[in-house]
Each structure stands twice: as C-alpha cells, then as structure tokens.
Image (cartoon, helix red, strand yellow):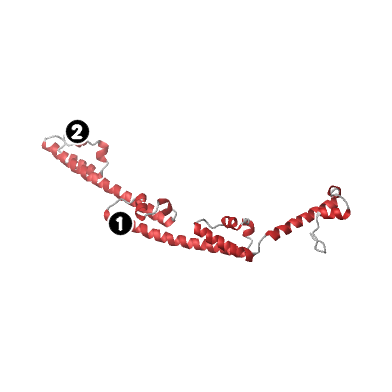
Amino acid sequence: MYTALGQQVTQLAVCERIGKSRSTLRLYPLVRAFFEQGASRYHVYQRRRAQPTEEELVPKVERAIAELVSLGEPITRRTLARKVKISPAVLMQFHRVVVLLEQQKRQKRQQGSTREEELFSRVQEAIQSCRASGQPITKEGLSSMVGVNRATLFHYPAVRALMTQSANEDQQQRGEQRYQKQEEELALHVVNAIQQLRDSGKRVSVRAVGNIVHVSYVGLHYYPKVKALLESAIAAQPSTGRTKQD
C-alpha cells in the first residue's frame, strides 16, 4: 500500500507518524484490521513483482526443455519448474509455456509411435527367422535377437501383444507336435505288442499290452489312436464267453 506521494505505508511508518507504538494501535479493532488489510495487499504486490513476465519466462523454459532433452530426463511441469526456479502452479499460468509443454507431449507421442513401429518390424523379422530355422519362439529369445531388453519391448502395447501371441502359438504348436509324436511312437509299440501276444497264442487285452509296453491303462487310453487300436484288436478276437475284458 502506498500514499499519494508514492511512499510505502507500513505499520512502523504509521506509528512514527502519529507517535504511538504498534502494540498500542493494535488494541483498536479498526486500526488492526487496517494494518492486516495493508499487509495482505503488500504481500500480493510483492508476489506479483517477484513473478517474471511471459517474455522473460518463455526463453528460460525453452532452454530448460533443451537441457532436459539432452539429459534424457522427462519434460513435465515439475521438472521445468525446478529448472527455471518457479513453482509449477505459477509456471502453468503462462499460455505460451502451456503451449510449449503440449508441443513436447505431441512430439513424444510421435516419437513413441515411430519407435513402436520400428521395434514391431524388428520383432516380426525375428519371429520369421525362428520359424524358418525351427527355433523356439520365446519372449527372451526374441528380446535377445532384437537386441532390446524385454521390459523396453513390453513398454509398447503392439510389440508386447505380438511377442505374447507368437510365443503362445509356438508353445501350443510344439505341444501338439510332441503329443502327436508320442502317440505315433506308442501306437507303434502297441501294434508290436498286439502282434507279440497273437504270435504266442495269448489273448489281447489292455492289461497284457500295458505290461509289454510298460504303460498304464490310463496312459494307453490317453491317446485316441492307441485306444482305437486296442479296441479293434480286442474286438477282433474270438469270443470266449467272458463278459468282461481285462
């Protein structure tokens, strides 16, 4: 608060002017309210004086952004405020500063999109290479082939989905191939066992075949092809009047 002569009105100045101490003047409610109102206005004025103008602040913000980019640090209202030594709340009151921040966000999104496309393409090539060579497709293996750690690759949703789907499909396919191979091998052993029982004049039963191939009843029935072979061989035998097969 200032007088018409441009002099600042303070409690001390008023006290000296009228020859009274501050403790005495503050005994009067109206005088105390006057002092408090003046102090409040003075603090607001001081805060406004301390704030830079937009023309002063924008170049500082631009330099701060360039520095953060060079250091690889995130560009946020907090990091900028720390660089230009001003509170985030005050910083965001300036329109041009807000525009600069929005521009940085758009650039980051564009860069992220470009990077995602690049990594997606590289992961696709790695998957094709695995399939061509018969190598298992795993997330760890793909990360190694691309030369980027899995945590970084998984940061990009499209890349993460591609890796997960490809690895799962490969695992399922390999599981089915193992199952088919095991079924074919067991079926061959069962055929030999059936023939062995017939050659020795013994009856063919699940238990007898199981004893020869060293596989349990449940194990023999786990594979449809093996189960069908056993059922066909047992049904083809002459009836002995027994009502139940072993």
Which is more toward the observer, 39 or 160? 39
Q: Residue at x 15, y 41 (%)?
A: 192
**Residue 128: x percent and y percent?**
31, 57
Q: Along the polypeptide, which appears first: circle 1 or circle 2?
A: 1
Q: Is residue 95 left or right of residue 239?
A: right
Pointer 1 local density, CA inside 10 Å: few below 14, some 14–19, many at least 20:
some
Q: Quadrant of residue 60?
A: bottom right
SS of the residue under disc 2: loop
Q: Is residue 187 above or below residue 3?
A: above
Quadrant into which the N terminus falls = bottom right
Helix, strand, or loop for circle 1? helix
Q: Position of residue 152 (x, y in %)?
A: 43, 53
Foreground disc of the pair 1, 2: 1
Image vertical order of residue 237 relative to residue 149, above or below: above
In this rendering, position of residue 159 left or right of residue 84? left
The residue at the point 64 percent across, 58 percent down is 90
For the residues labelled 1 and 2, the Cα–Cα distance comes to: 59 Å
Residue 242's label in the rendered image is: 2
Q: Residue furthest right?
A: 19
Residue at 56 percent across and 60 percent down: it is 64
Using the rendered view, name the quadrant where residue 188 is placed.
top left
Q: Is residue 205 left or right of residue 112?
A: left
Residue at 44% x, 55% y is 157
Residue 200 screen position, x and y as percent: 11, 35
Count of marks overlaid on the render:
2
Amino acid type, label 1:
Ser
Q: Quick check: marks 1 and 2 in contact, CB under 8 Å?
A: no
Q: Callout 2, which amino acid?
A: Arg
Residue 246 percent across, percent down from the top left: 21, 34
- According to the image, label 1 marks what residue? 129
**Of 76 and 197, which appears nearest the observer?**
76
